[in-house]
Image (tube, rainbow, N blue to C red):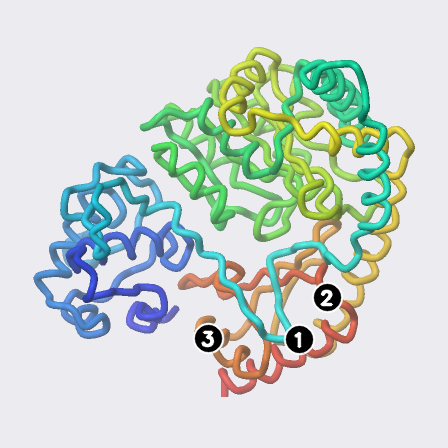
């Protein structure tokens, strides 16, 4: 944005005077949440306190007290004669001790508890007829009938003299064998069952890995812009987050090396094949550099391959884990995103000793195995149904991607720039005109199109949107992009 005053603070700084929590603490919480979710990116210059207290309708002394708190925790930095700026390399622990005043509740529930300023969900729900998301599949394409028949057939054949524990152990072992073979075949990694942990979701897999891998104070490098959910998970461990920029061929490896030369890095979190949100793939040269840097400086590469299933070329780029000869990569991913809710999986591929430690923590979060679900998916894998479904879906989504690209070029020519991604269900669109994305979102909402805040990216030098096309049919795409075009004309004129 041209000026910090143009930042729509009131759209994401929500103060509630009626609550018992002090206003200055509410300000602290709201600013931290805005930084974590990307509404206030690194380097953003804040207005002066006199201007900002008028915008937010708060007392100046209250605002100064909140800023002092934020600066002491490392969220902002005040430079003499220059102003106050947002930081990304937070010096504070992710969750600090909550005071008695913070613990109090307007409902007076009878006990105190810690409140997280990090894990506030930014997810929004809308009933508008047209909606963009950040790249989710179309649930209308799910083959629920096939899965239902398999599930019912497994339930009917469940009578046996064996104990549940015996069935569970055998079923899970069989599933891991077939699933590890499937990963070796499709993703080029070389693992056995001892190198594999399966979880009920990708989010659980990431949570378990960060819990075991990171302790408070560890330095974790992430790309900027990045994925708000993974950043929340990483920050919640107490890690100090260090962000590095993303170039046209992936993360800035020169900057990564500079950081490694002065700072002990514990983890590099990386979406190498399909960077979120920009959809950029890490180049072959940089892949080698990242692996060499990990070996040289001793940090762990946490490679998140969240969207491997949706690639549209015959020779997909393999993950870093496929070339990791020094066991520096912990590889997490998802499986079955096109399947009904409850049938998808998350997984971790890593050295066997690390997997054993993860299993200890998983036994608390997920103590029982869904035997029937695993048997159904094992059958899908062994009979090749997973490959057939993947091939069918990729054809559909490739057609949708190509049509979406043609609509963008037709209706927004000269207004945007983007690259056609070779995989995934979203396109990273950079707007050539400079305008307020929050105002744009509101204008689109008036015409029936929902743009969640999580897909909007705006800094002083960037106005961009991550537009998911996977959930839209052709007519829906046409209408949605038409609304974008109409609203853009209203905003910039």
Residue 403: horizontal and vertical position, in percent?
79, 67
* Label 2: element kind: loop
**Distance from label 1 to label 3 (Cα)?**
19 Å
Residue 177 falls left or right of residue 149: left
Task: Please name the residue shown 68% across and 44% down the image.
Answer: 307
Q: Is residue 47 above or below residue 215?
A: below
Whether the residues at callouts 2 and 1 have beta carbons within 8 Å, the answer is yes
Observer-nearest residue: 327 or 354? 354
Q: Give whichever of 219, 127 is nearer the camera.
A: 127
- Mark 2 to mark 1 CA distance (whole Å): 9 Å
Q: Which residue lies furthest to the top in this view?
A: 353
Q: What element carries label 1?
A: helix
For marks 1 and 3, the one nearer the N-term is 3
Please name which of the two marks, 1 or 3, marks the residue nearer to the observer: 1
The residue where tag 3 is placed is: 435
Circle 1 residue = 480
């Amino acid at each position: 944005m041209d000026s910090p005053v143009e930042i729509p603070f009131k759209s994401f700084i929500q103060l509630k005077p009626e609550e018992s929590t002090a206003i200055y603490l509410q300000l602290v919480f709201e600013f931290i949440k805005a930084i974590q979710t990307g509404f206030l990116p690194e380097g953003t210059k804040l207005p002066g306190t006199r201007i900002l207290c008028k915008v937010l309708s708060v007392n100046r002394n209250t605002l100064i007290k909140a800023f002092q708190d934020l600066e002491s925790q490392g969220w902002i930095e005040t430079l003499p004669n220059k102003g106050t700026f947002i930081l990304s390399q937070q010096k504070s622990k992710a969750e600090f001790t909550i005071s008695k005043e913070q613990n109090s509740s307007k409902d007076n529930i009878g006990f105190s508890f810690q409140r997280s300023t990090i894990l506030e969900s930014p997810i929004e729900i809308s009933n508008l007829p047209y909606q963009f998301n950040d790249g989710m599949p179309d649930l209308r394409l799910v083959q629920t009938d096939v899965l239902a028949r398999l599930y019912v057939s497994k339930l009917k054949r469940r009578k046996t003299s064996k104990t549940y524990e015996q069935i569970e152990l055998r079923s899970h072992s069989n599933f891991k064998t077939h699933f590890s073979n499937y990963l070796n075949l499709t993703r080029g990694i070389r693992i056995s069952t001892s190198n594999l942990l399966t979880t009920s979701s990708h989010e659980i897999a990431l949570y378990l890995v960060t819990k075991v891998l990171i302790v408070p104070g560890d330095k974790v490098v992430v790309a900027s812009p990045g994925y708000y959910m993974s950043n929340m998970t990483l920050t919640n461990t107490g890690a100090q987050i260090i962000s590095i920029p993303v170039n046209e061929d992936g993360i800035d490896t020169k900057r990564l090396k500079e950081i490694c030369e002065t700072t002990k890095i514990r983890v590099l979190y990386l979406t190498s094949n399909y960077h979120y949100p920009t959809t950029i793939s890490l180049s072959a040269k940089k892949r080698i550099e990242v692996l060499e840097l990990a070996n040289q400086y001793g940090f762990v590469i946490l490679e998140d391959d969240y969207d491997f299933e949706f690639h549209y070329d015959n020779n997909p780029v393999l993950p870093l884990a496929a070339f990791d000869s020094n066991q520096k990569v912990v590889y997490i991913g998802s499986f079955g995103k096109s399947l009904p809710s409850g049938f998808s999986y998350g997984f971790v591929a890593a050295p066997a000793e690390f997997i054993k430690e993860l299993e200890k923590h998983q036994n608390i979060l997920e103590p029982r195995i869904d035997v029937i679900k695993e048997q159904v998916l094992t059958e899908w894998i062994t009979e090749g149904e997973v490959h057939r479904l993947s091939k069918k879906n990729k054809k559909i989504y490739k057609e949708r991607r190509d049509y979406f690209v043609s609509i963008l070029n037709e209706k927004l020519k000269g207004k945007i720039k983007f690259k056609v991604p070779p995989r995934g269900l979203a396109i990273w669109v950079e707007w050539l005109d400079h305008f307020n994305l929050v105002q744009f979102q509101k204008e689109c909402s008036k015409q029936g199109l929902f743009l969640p805040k999580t897909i909007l990216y705006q800094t002083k030098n960037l106005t961009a949107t991550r537009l998911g096309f996977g959930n839209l049919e052709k007519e829906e795409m046409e209408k949605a992009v038409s609304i974008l075009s109409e609203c853009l004309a209203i905003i910039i004129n």
